[in-house]
Amino acid sequence: MITIDENPLISQLLRRADDALVLGHRLSEWCGHAPTPEEDLALANIALDQIGLARALYAEAGARSGHTEDQLAYLRTDRQYRNCLLVEQPNGDFAHTIVRQLLYSAFADPFWRAAGGSTAEEIAAIAAKAEKESAYHLRHSAEWLIRLGDGTDESHRRASAAVEALWPFTDELFETDAADATLIATRVIPDPQAIRPAWESTVGSALSRATLARPSAGWMQTGGRRGRHSEQLGLLLAEMQYLQRAYPGANW
Amino acid sequence: MNERDEALRRRALVCAASVVDPEIPALTIADLGILRGVSVRDGEVEVTITPTYSGCPAMTLIALDIQTALARAGIANAHIRTVLSPAWTTDWLTETARAKLSEAGIAPPPPGASRRALFTEEAPRCPHCGSADTEQISEFGSTACKALHRCRACREPFDAFKCH
Protein backbone atom coordinates (compact mmCIF):
# COMPACT_ATOMS: atom_id res chain seq x y z
CA MET A 1 0.00 0.00 0.00
CA ILE A 2 1.22 3.49 -0.82
CA THR A 3 0.38 6.72 0.96
CA ILE A 4 -0.28 9.84 -1.04
CA ASP A 5 0.37 13.35 0.10
CA GLU A 6 -2.73 14.81 -1.53
CA ASN A 7 -3.25 18.40 -2.58
CA PRO A 8 -6.27 19.75 -4.47
CA LEU A 9 -4.77 19.07 -7.89
CA ILE A 10 -3.60 15.54 -7.08
CA SER A 11 -7.02 14.73 -5.55
CA GLN A 12 -8.77 16.08 -8.61
CA LEU A 13 -6.57 14.08 -11.00
CA LEU A 14 -7.17 10.93 -8.95
CA ARG A 15 -10.94 11.46 -8.91
CA ARG A 16 -11.08 11.71 -12.70
CA ALA A 17 -8.58 8.91 -13.21
CA ASP A 18 -10.36 6.58 -10.79
CA ASP A 19 -13.71 7.22 -12.52
CA ALA A 20 -12.14 6.23 -15.83
CA LEU A 21 -10.25 3.19 -14.54
CA VAL A 22 -13.10 1.71 -12.53
CA LEU A 23 -15.60 2.20 -15.36
CA GLY A 24 -13.06 0.82 -17.83
CA HIS A 25 -12.56 -2.24 -15.66
CA ARG A 26 -16.31 -2.79 -15.32
CA LEU A 27 -16.76 -2.59 -19.10
CA SER A 28 -13.86 -4.97 -19.66
CA GLU A 29 -15.80 -7.57 -17.65
CA TRP A 30 -18.13 -7.80 -20.67
CA CYS A 31 -15.33 -8.95 -22.94
CA GLY A 32 -16.42 -12.33 -24.32
CA HIS A 33 -19.86 -12.05 -22.67
CA ALA A 34 -21.68 -9.28 -24.55
CA PRO A 35 -25.00 -10.03 -26.29
CA THR A 36 -23.49 -9.83 -29.80
CA PRO A 37 -19.94 -9.78 -31.23
CA GLU A 38 -20.42 -6.16 -32.34
CA GLU A 39 -21.37 -5.17 -28.80
CA ASP A 40 -18.45 -7.12 -27.39
CA LEU A 41 -16.15 -5.01 -29.58
CA ALA A 42 -17.97 -1.80 -28.69
CA LEU A 43 -17.81 -2.30 -24.91
CA ALA A 44 -14.17 -3.41 -25.08
CA ASN A 45 -13.35 -0.35 -27.20
CA ILE A 46 -15.01 1.97 -24.71
CA ALA A 47 -13.17 0.19 -21.88
CA LEU A 48 -9.91 0.79 -23.73
CA ASP A 49 -10.66 4.50 -24.12
CA GLN A 50 -11.42 4.75 -20.40
CA ILE A 51 -8.25 2.95 -19.37
CA GLY A 52 -6.20 5.09 -21.77
CA LEU A 53 -7.69 8.20 -20.20
CA ALA A 54 -6.99 6.83 -16.71
CA ARG A 55 -3.33 6.24 -17.62
CA ALA A 56 -2.85 9.80 -18.86
CA LEU A 57 -4.39 11.18 -15.64
CA TYR A 58 -2.43 8.82 -13.36
CA ALA A 59 0.78 9.86 -15.11
CA GLU A 60 0.01 13.50 -14.20
CA ALA A 61 -1.01 12.66 -10.63
CA GLY A 62 2.03 10.41 -10.22
CA ALA A 63 4.42 13.06 -11.51
CA ARG A 64 3.21 15.26 -8.66
CA SER A 65 2.98 12.64 -5.91
CA GLY A 66 6.09 10.65 -6.79
CA HIS A 67 4.36 7.46 -7.92
CA THR A 68 4.07 5.44 -11.10
CA GLU A 69 0.77 4.82 -12.93
CA ASP A 70 0.87 1.20 -11.81
CA GLN A 71 1.43 2.06 -8.16
CA LEU A 72 -1.57 4.39 -8.21
CA ALA A 73 -3.80 1.78 -9.83
CA TYR A 74 -2.63 -1.34 -8.01
CA LEU A 75 -1.38 -0.27 -4.61
CA ARG A 76 -4.20 1.83 -3.23
CA THR A 77 -7.01 0.38 -1.11
CA ASP A 78 -10.68 1.02 -1.78
CA ARG A 79 -10.67 3.81 0.83
CA GLN A 80 -7.98 5.60 -1.20
CA TYR A 81 -9.99 5.40 -4.41
CA ARG A 82 -11.80 8.65 -5.28
CA ASN A 83 -14.20 7.54 -8.02
CA CYS A 84 -17.92 8.28 -7.91
CA LEU A 85 -20.17 5.43 -6.81
CA LEU A 86 -21.98 5.25 -10.16
CA VAL A 87 -19.01 3.79 -12.06
CA GLU A 88 -18.35 0.99 -9.56
CA GLN A 89 -21.91 -0.35 -9.71
CA PRO A 90 -21.93 -3.90 -11.08
CA ASN A 91 -22.69 -4.51 -14.75
CA GLY A 92 -25.99 -6.21 -13.94
CA ASP A 93 -27.87 -6.98 -17.14
CA PHE A 94 -27.11 -5.22 -20.43
CA ALA A 95 -29.68 -2.50 -19.62
CA HIS A 96 -27.87 -1.65 -16.36
CA THR A 97 -24.55 -1.34 -18.21
CA ILE A 98 -26.08 0.90 -20.89
CA VAL A 99 -27.91 3.13 -18.40
CA ARG A 100 -24.77 3.48 -16.23
CA GLN A 101 -22.81 4.44 -19.36
CA LEU A 102 -25.39 6.96 -20.51
CA LEU A 103 -25.67 8.65 -17.09
CA TYR A 104 -21.88 8.87 -16.86
CA SER A 105 -21.13 9.83 -20.50
CA ALA A 106 -23.80 12.55 -20.48
CA PHE A 107 -21.66 14.14 -17.76
CA ALA A 108 -18.18 13.22 -19.00
CA ASP A 109 -18.74 14.50 -22.53
CA PRO A 110 -19.55 18.14 -21.64
CA PHE A 111 -17.15 18.03 -18.68
CA TRP A 112 -14.14 17.17 -20.84
CA ARG A 113 -15.22 19.56 -23.57
CA ALA A 114 -15.23 22.37 -20.99
CA ALA A 115 -11.95 21.12 -19.48
CA GLY A 116 -10.35 21.64 -22.90
CA GLY A 117 -10.18 25.29 -21.87
CA SER A 118 -8.31 24.50 -18.64
CA THR A 119 -5.60 26.90 -17.54
CA ALA A 120 -3.45 23.83 -16.78
CA GLU A 121 -1.85 22.81 -20.07
CA GLU A 122 -1.66 19.09 -19.14
CA ILE A 123 -5.36 18.91 -18.27
CA ALA A 124 -6.34 20.75 -21.46
CA ALA A 125 -4.32 18.27 -23.54
CA ILE A 126 -5.89 15.22 -21.87
CA ALA A 127 -9.37 16.77 -22.13
CA ALA A 128 -8.99 17.41 -25.87
CA LYS A 129 -8.60 13.67 -26.44
CA ALA A 130 -11.18 12.60 -23.86
CA GLU A 131 -13.96 14.78 -25.25
CA LYS A 132 -13.67 13.29 -28.74
CA GLU A 133 -13.93 9.78 -27.35
CA SER A 134 -16.72 10.51 -24.89
CA ALA A 135 -18.86 11.84 -27.76
CA TYR A 136 -18.83 8.31 -29.21
CA HIS A 137 -19.55 6.70 -25.83
CA LEU A 138 -22.52 8.98 -25.33
CA ARG A 139 -23.97 8.29 -28.76
CA HIS A 140 -23.51 4.55 -28.34
CA SER A 141 -25.33 4.41 -25.01
CA ALA A 142 -28.08 6.85 -26.05
CA GLU A 143 -28.89 4.83 -29.17
CA TRP A 144 -29.03 1.61 -27.14
CA LEU A 145 -31.19 3.18 -24.45
CA ILE A 146 -33.77 4.13 -27.09
CA ARG A 147 -33.75 0.62 -28.55
CA LEU A 148 -34.15 -0.96 -25.11
CA GLY A 149 -36.72 1.48 -23.72
CA ASP A 150 -38.78 1.61 -26.90
CA GLY A 151 -38.24 -2.07 -27.72
CA THR A 152 -40.12 -5.02 -26.27
CA ASP A 153 -42.04 -5.11 -22.98
CA GLU A 154 -39.18 -7.05 -21.45
CA SER A 155 -36.43 -4.67 -22.61
CA HIS A 156 -38.56 -1.70 -21.48
CA ARG A 157 -39.05 -3.27 -18.05
CA ARG A 158 -35.33 -3.91 -17.65
CA ALA A 159 -34.27 -0.46 -18.89
CA SER A 160 -36.79 1.15 -16.56
CA ALA A 161 -35.53 -0.88 -13.59
CA ALA A 162 -31.94 0.12 -14.41
CA VAL A 163 -32.82 3.83 -14.53
CA GLU A 164 -34.58 3.57 -11.16
CA ALA A 165 -31.69 1.64 -9.59
CA LEU A 166 -28.89 3.92 -10.82
CA TRP A 167 -30.60 7.30 -10.51
CA PRO A 168 -29.59 7.82 -6.81
CA PHE A 169 -25.93 7.79 -7.90
CA THR A 170 -26.25 10.73 -10.31
CA ASP A 171 -26.05 13.67 -7.88
CA GLU A 172 -22.51 12.75 -6.97
CA LEU A 173 -21.34 13.62 -10.49
CA PHE A 174 -21.95 17.28 -9.72
CA GLU A 175 -20.54 17.35 -6.19
CA THR A 176 -17.74 19.74 -5.32
CA ASP A 177 -15.80 20.33 -2.12
CA ALA A 178 -13.35 22.93 -0.79
CA ALA A 179 -10.45 21.38 -2.75
CA ASP A 180 -12.40 21.68 -6.01
CA ALA A 181 -13.36 25.29 -5.26
CA THR A 182 -9.80 26.59 -5.62
CA LEU A 183 -9.33 24.68 -8.89
CA ILE A 184 -12.63 25.96 -10.26
CA ALA A 185 -11.82 29.54 -9.26
CA THR A 186 -8.49 29.38 -11.10
CA ARG A 187 -10.19 27.63 -14.06
CA VAL A 188 -8.03 24.53 -13.78
CA ILE A 189 -11.21 22.44 -13.99
CA PRO A 190 -14.73 23.40 -15.05
CA ASP A 191 -17.41 23.71 -12.38
CA PRO A 192 -19.38 20.43 -12.43
CA GLN A 193 -22.49 22.39 -11.40
CA ALA A 194 -22.26 24.31 -14.65
CA ILE A 195 -22.36 21.00 -16.53
CA ARG A 196 -25.72 20.09 -14.98
CA PRO A 197 -28.03 21.79 -17.52
CA ALA A 198 -26.30 19.99 -20.40
CA TRP A 199 -26.55 16.67 -18.55
CA GLU A 200 -30.24 17.21 -17.72
CA SER A 201 -31.04 18.01 -21.32
CA THR A 202 -29.14 15.02 -22.81
CA VAL A 203 -30.48 12.52 -20.30
CA GLY A 204 -34.00 13.98 -20.45
CA SER A 205 -34.14 13.78 -24.24
CA ALA A 206 -32.72 10.23 -24.35
CA LEU A 207 -35.18 9.04 -21.69
CA SER A 208 -38.17 10.57 -23.41
CA ARG A 209 -37.21 9.13 -26.82
CA ALA A 210 -36.79 5.79 -25.05
CA THR A 211 -40.32 6.17 -23.58
CA LEU A 212 -38.81 5.89 -20.09
CA ALA A 213 -39.85 7.99 -17.12
CA ARG A 214 -37.33 10.30 -15.48
CA PRO A 215 -37.31 9.32 -11.79
CA SER A 216 -38.46 12.05 -9.46
CA ALA A 217 -35.80 13.65 -7.29
CA GLY A 218 -35.30 11.53 -4.21
CA TRP A 219 -32.59 10.49 -1.81
CA MET A 220 -29.14 10.61 -3.35
CA GLN A 221 -26.04 8.55 -2.60
CA THR A 222 -22.70 10.19 -1.80
CA GLY A 223 -19.25 9.31 -0.43
CA GLY A 224 -17.09 8.02 -3.28
CA ARG A 225 -15.05 11.22 -3.64
CA ARG A 226 -14.06 10.87 0.04
CA GLY A 227 -13.22 7.17 -0.26
CA ARG A 228 -16.50 5.84 1.16
CA HIS A 229 -17.50 3.21 -1.35
CA SER A 230 -20.03 0.46 -1.77
CA GLU A 231 -18.96 -3.11 -1.10
CA GLN A 232 -18.70 -3.57 -4.88
CA LEU A 233 -15.47 -1.58 -5.27
CA GLY A 234 -13.52 -3.78 -2.86
CA LEU A 235 -14.49 -6.85 -4.86
CA LEU A 236 -13.53 -5.17 -8.13
CA LEU A 237 -10.12 -4.13 -6.77
CA ALA A 238 -9.50 -7.58 -5.30
CA GLU A 239 -9.63 -8.95 -8.82
CA MET A 240 -7.89 -6.06 -10.56
CA GLN A 241 -5.03 -5.84 -8.05
CA TYR A 242 -4.57 -9.56 -7.46
CA LEU A 243 -1.40 -9.98 -9.48
CA GLN A 244 0.47 -7.05 -7.93
CA ARG A 245 -0.64 -8.10 -4.46
CA ALA A 246 0.44 -11.71 -4.95
CA TYR A 247 3.67 -10.94 -6.82
CA PRO A 248 4.74 -7.43 -5.78
CA GLY A 249 6.59 -5.56 -8.51
CA ALA A 250 5.87 -8.15 -11.20
CA ASN A 251 6.02 -6.79 -14.74
CA TRP A 252 5.94 -8.04 -18.32
CA MET B 1 21.14 22.69 -34.73
CA ASN B 2 24.51 22.07 -36.34
CA GLU B 3 24.97 20.48 -39.75
CA ARG B 4 25.75 17.04 -38.41
CA ASP B 5 22.64 16.99 -36.23
CA GLU B 6 20.52 18.23 -39.15
CA ALA B 7 21.82 15.45 -41.41
CA LEU B 8 21.11 12.89 -38.69
CA ARG B 9 17.65 14.33 -38.16
CA ARG B 10 16.78 13.97 -41.84
CA ARG B 11 18.06 10.40 -41.90
CA ALA B 12 16.12 9.50 -38.72
CA LEU B 13 12.96 11.11 -40.09
CA VAL B 14 13.08 8.95 -43.23
CA CYS B 15 13.48 5.82 -41.07
CA ALA B 16 10.70 6.73 -38.61
CA ALA B 17 8.36 7.76 -41.43
CA SER B 18 8.72 4.33 -43.04
CA VAL B 19 7.38 2.48 -39.97
CA VAL B 20 3.94 1.00 -40.73
CA ASP B 21 1.00 0.99 -38.34
CA PRO B 22 0.81 -2.47 -36.75
CA GLU B 23 -2.99 -2.57 -37.05
CA ILE B 24 -3.31 -0.96 -40.49
CA PRO B 25 -0.10 -2.10 -42.21
CA ALA B 26 -1.19 -0.46 -45.47
CA LEU B 27 -0.36 2.90 -43.92
CA THR B 28 2.80 4.32 -42.39
CA ILE B 29 2.72 6.23 -39.13
CA ALA B 30 3.53 9.33 -41.18
CA ASP B 31 0.47 8.77 -43.44
CA LEU B 32 -1.72 8.50 -40.32
CA GLY B 33 -0.33 11.60 -38.65
CA ILE B 34 0.89 9.58 -35.65
CA LEU B 35 4.48 10.69 -36.29
CA ARG B 36 4.69 14.30 -35.11
CA GLY B 37 8.38 15.04 -35.60
CA VAL B 38 12.01 14.17 -35.10
CA SER B 39 14.56 16.35 -33.36
CA VAL B 40 18.27 15.91 -32.70
CA ARG B 41 20.39 17.49 -30.02
CA ASP B 42 24.08 16.74 -29.75
CA GLY B 43 23.66 13.49 -31.66
CA GLU B 44 20.66 12.34 -29.52
CA VAL B 45 17.55 11.53 -31.53
CA GLU B 46 14.07 12.18 -30.17
CA VAL B 47 10.99 11.01 -32.08
CA THR B 48 7.61 12.45 -31.11
CA ILE B 49 4.43 10.45 -31.66
CA THR B 50 0.78 10.92 -30.70
CA PRO B 51 -1.94 8.28 -30.18
CA THR B 52 -5.03 8.19 -32.40
CA TYR B 53 -7.12 7.16 -29.35
CA SER B 54 -5.96 7.45 -25.71
CA GLY B 55 -6.15 3.73 -25.11
CA CYS B 56 -4.56 2.72 -28.42
CA PRO B 57 -2.75 -0.53 -27.52
CA ALA B 58 -0.45 -0.21 -30.53
CA MET B 59 1.56 2.70 -29.10
CA THR B 60 4.12 0.54 -27.29
CA LEU B 61 4.68 -1.55 -30.40
CA ILE B 62 4.95 1.54 -32.60
CA ALA B 63 7.61 2.97 -30.27
CA LEU B 64 9.51 -0.32 -30.42
CA ASP B 65 9.19 -0.48 -34.23
CA ILE B 66 10.60 3.04 -34.55
CA GLN B 67 13.55 2.17 -32.32
CA THR B 68 14.16 -0.98 -34.36
CA ALA B 69 14.00 0.89 -37.68
CA LEU B 70 16.44 3.48 -36.38
CA ALA B 71 18.78 0.85 -34.92
CA ARG B 72 18.86 -0.92 -38.30
CA ALA B 73 20.05 2.33 -39.81
CA GLY B 74 22.74 2.59 -37.16
CA ILE B 75 20.97 5.14 -34.99
CA ALA B 76 20.99 3.78 -31.45
CA ASN B 77 19.36 4.96 -28.22
CA ALA B 78 16.65 7.05 -29.83
CA HIS B 79 14.21 8.48 -27.33
CA ILE B 80 10.49 8.17 -28.14
CA ARG B 81 8.24 10.82 -26.66
CA THR B 82 4.44 10.53 -26.63
CA VAL B 83 2.45 13.76 -26.70
CA LEU B 84 -1.32 14.25 -26.40
CA SER B 85 -1.50 17.82 -27.59
CA PRO B 86 -2.51 18.86 -30.17
CA ALA B 87 -5.03 16.00 -30.17
CA TRP B 88 -4.90 13.72 -33.20
CA THR B 89 -7.64 14.22 -35.74
CA THR B 90 -8.66 12.47 -38.95
CA ASP B 91 -8.01 15.80 -40.68
CA TRP B 92 -4.32 14.86 -40.48
CA LEU B 93 -4.81 11.90 -42.82
CA THR B 94 -3.05 12.89 -46.02
CA GLU B 95 -4.69 12.47 -49.44
CA THR B 96 -2.25 9.60 -50.01
CA ALA B 97 -3.43 8.05 -46.74
CA ARG B 98 -7.07 8.30 -47.80
CA ALA B 99 -6.30 6.65 -51.13
CA LYS B 100 -4.30 3.89 -49.41
CA LEU B 101 -7.15 3.26 -46.94
CA SER B 102 -9.68 2.79 -49.75
CA GLU B 103 -7.21 0.53 -51.51
CA ALA B 104 -6.96 -1.60 -48.34
CA GLY B 105 -10.76 -1.93 -48.13
CA ILE B 106 -11.20 0.64 -45.35
CA ALA B 107 -13.46 3.60 -46.02
CA PRO B 108 -11.73 6.91 -45.19
CA PRO B 109 -13.71 9.31 -42.96
CA PRO B 110 -16.24 11.33 -44.98
CA PRO B 111 -15.12 14.95 -45.28
CA GLY B 112 -16.91 17.32 -42.92
CA ALA B 113 -18.68 14.55 -40.97
CA SER B 114 -19.94 15.63 -37.57
CA ARG B 115 -19.14 13.36 -34.66
CA ARG B 116 -21.26 15.58 -32.44
CA ALA B 117 -24.59 14.67 -34.03
CA LEU B 118 -26.20 12.50 -31.36
CA PHE B 119 -28.39 10.26 -33.48
CA THR B 120 -27.33 10.61 -37.08
CA GLU B 121 -24.46 9.22 -39.01
CA GLU B 122 -23.34 10.02 -42.54
CA ALA B 123 -22.85 6.89 -44.60
CA PRO B 124 -19.36 6.34 -46.02
CA ARG B 125 -18.94 5.01 -49.56
CA CYS B 126 -18.24 1.31 -49.94
CA PRO B 127 -14.49 0.89 -50.54
CA HIS B 128 -15.18 -2.26 -52.60
CA CYS B 129 -17.80 -1.17 -55.14
CA GLY B 130 -18.03 2.57 -54.52
CA SER B 131 -21.74 2.55 -53.72
CA ALA B 132 -23.08 5.19 -51.34
CA ASP B 133 -25.85 2.83 -50.22
CA THR B 134 -24.21 1.58 -47.02
CA GLU B 135 -25.30 1.05 -43.44
CA GLN B 136 -23.55 1.03 -40.10
CA ILE B 137 -23.44 -2.26 -38.22
CA SER B 138 -21.51 -1.01 -35.22
CA GLU B 139 -19.94 2.27 -34.16
CA PHE B 140 -16.96 0.29 -32.87
CA GLY B 141 -14.92 -1.90 -35.20
CA SER B 142 -11.83 -4.07 -35.18
CA THR B 143 -9.72 -1.26 -33.70
CA ALA B 144 -10.57 1.84 -31.66
CA CYS B 145 -10.23 4.08 -34.72
CA LYS B 146 -12.65 2.19 -36.98
CA ALA B 147 -16.39 1.43 -37.20
CA LEU B 148 -18.09 -1.52 -38.86
CA HIS B 149 -20.30 -1.00 -41.94
CA ARG B 150 -22.01 -3.04 -44.66
CA CYS B 151 -22.67 -2.21 -48.28
CA ARG B 152 -26.29 -2.72 -49.36
CA ALA B 153 -25.25 -2.85 -53.03
CA CYS B 154 -22.49 -5.47 -53.01
CA ARG B 155 -23.38 -6.90 -49.56
CA GLU B 156 -19.76 -6.80 -48.42
CA PRO B 157 -18.97 -5.72 -44.85
CA PHE B 158 -16.16 -3.18 -44.45
CA ASP B 159 -14.32 -1.13 -41.85
CA ALA B 160 -14.64 2.64 -41.95
CA PHE B 161 -12.27 5.08 -40.33
CA LYS B 162 -14.17 7.09 -37.72
CA CYS B 163 -14.29 10.83 -38.07
CA HIS B 164 -12.40 12.01 -35.04
Image: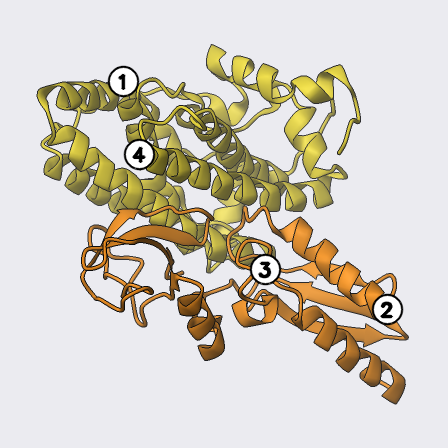
Chain colours: A yellow, B orange
Give the label on residue B93, or none.
none
Give the label on residue A103, or none.
4
- Residue B38 lies left or right of residue A200; in this view the side is right
**Residue bearing the label numbered 3:** B21
Mark nearer the viewer, 2 or 4: 2
Q: Amino acid at mark 4?
A: Leu
**Residue bearing the label numbered 2:** B75
Q: Amino acid at mark 1?
A: Ala
Residue A28 position in % (x across, y down):
48, 29
Label 1 and label 2: CA atoms lie apart by 59 Å
The tag earlier along the polypeptide, 3 or 2, is 3
Label 4 and label 1: CA atoms lie apart by 12 Å
Label 1 and label 3: CA atoms lie apart by 44 Å
Give the label on residue A165, or none.
1
**Is B104 in front, or is B121?**
B104
Classify 10 Å Cα crowding around label 4: few (below 14), some (14-19), many (20 and above).
many
Rendered residue at 30%/31% (across/down): A98
Please tell me whether mark 4 sits on a helix, a strand or a loop.
helix
**Is B24 in front, or is A59?**
B24
Question: In what quadrant of the picture does the C terminus of chain A appear?
Answer: top right
Mark nearer the viewer, 1 or 2: 2
Q: Are marks 4 and 1 on the same chain?
A: yes
